[in-house]
Image (cartoon, helix red, strand yellow):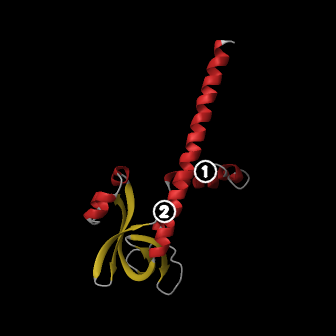
């Protein structure tokens, strides 16, 4: 056999092994995530709260209890999390917000939220309405929209595929 064929077979074998390992790690992570979601659903409660401020900040700068910071993995301590500072009853608390709903949380408004421990999973308006906050667009999406406006209606379909 030629050397190029042997090298190709070795690379193909390594790629197959990597794909199998990633498949099983993904299955394991999915199972862990399902268990965590079940725990969140079991402990959720609905509260009325006044949202004071919201930011994306590091876990150690968020003002969360030291026990929470100690239990967090080292990677999570360094990454930025969506933090909401809210007044629930007489207490002002820092809560971690779900990244999917972080943009829809209004600031300086009273909302009805579903929380599980220190984690906000859902936010509704005070009277059950869904709160629609202004969503900031990334620089890339702003650039694509400007390009679509300049290109006109005939070529706008091509740029939509890029997003």
Q: Which residue, as the protein is rendered here, is positioned at the far bottom?
A: 127
Label 1 and label 2: CA atoms lie apart by: 18 Å
Where residue 88 sits: x, y (%)? Answer: 34, 81
Where residue 10 sits: x, y (%)? Answer: 61, 24
Q: Which residue, as the protein is rendered here, is positioned at the far right?
A: 154
Q: Find residue 63 and report its image quarter.
A: bottom left
> Is residue 142 something that shows in the picture?
no
The answer to whether residue 148 is left or right of residue 75 is right
Q: Earlier in the sequence, mark 1 or mark 2?
A: 2
Q: Is residue 32 above or below residue 53?
A: above
Asked if labels 2 and 1 touch by Cβ distance under 8 angstroms, the answer is: no
Where residue 149 sits: x, y (%)? Answer: 63, 55
Q: Which mark is residue 147?
A: 1
Q: Is residue 81 above or below residue 134?
A: above
Q: Which mark is residue 134?
A: none
Tell me which residue sits at (52%, 74%) in the image: 132
Q: Which residue is mark 2?
A: 136
Q: Nearer the viewer, mark 1 or mark 2?
A: 2
């Amino acid at each position: 056999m030629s050397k190029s064929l042997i090298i190709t077979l070795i690379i193909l074998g390594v790629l197959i092994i990597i794909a199998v390992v990633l498949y099983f790690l993904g299955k394991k992570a999915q199972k862990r995530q399902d268990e965590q979601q079940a725990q969140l659903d079991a402990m959720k409660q609905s509260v009325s709260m006044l949202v004071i401020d919201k930011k994306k900040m590091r876990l150690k700068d968020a003002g969360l209890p030291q026990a929470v910071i100690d239990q967090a993995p080292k990677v999570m301590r360094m990454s930025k999390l969506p933090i909401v500072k809210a007044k629930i009853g007489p207490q002002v608390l820092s809560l971690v917000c779900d990244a999917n709903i972080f943009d829809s949380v209004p600031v300086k408004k009273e909302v009805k939220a579903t929380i599980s421990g220190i984690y906000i999973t859902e936010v509704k308006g005070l009277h059950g309405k869904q709160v629609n906050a202004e969503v900031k667009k990334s620089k890339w999406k702003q650039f694509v929209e400007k390009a679509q406006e300049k290109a006109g209606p005939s070529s706008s379909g091509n740029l939509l595929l890029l997003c």
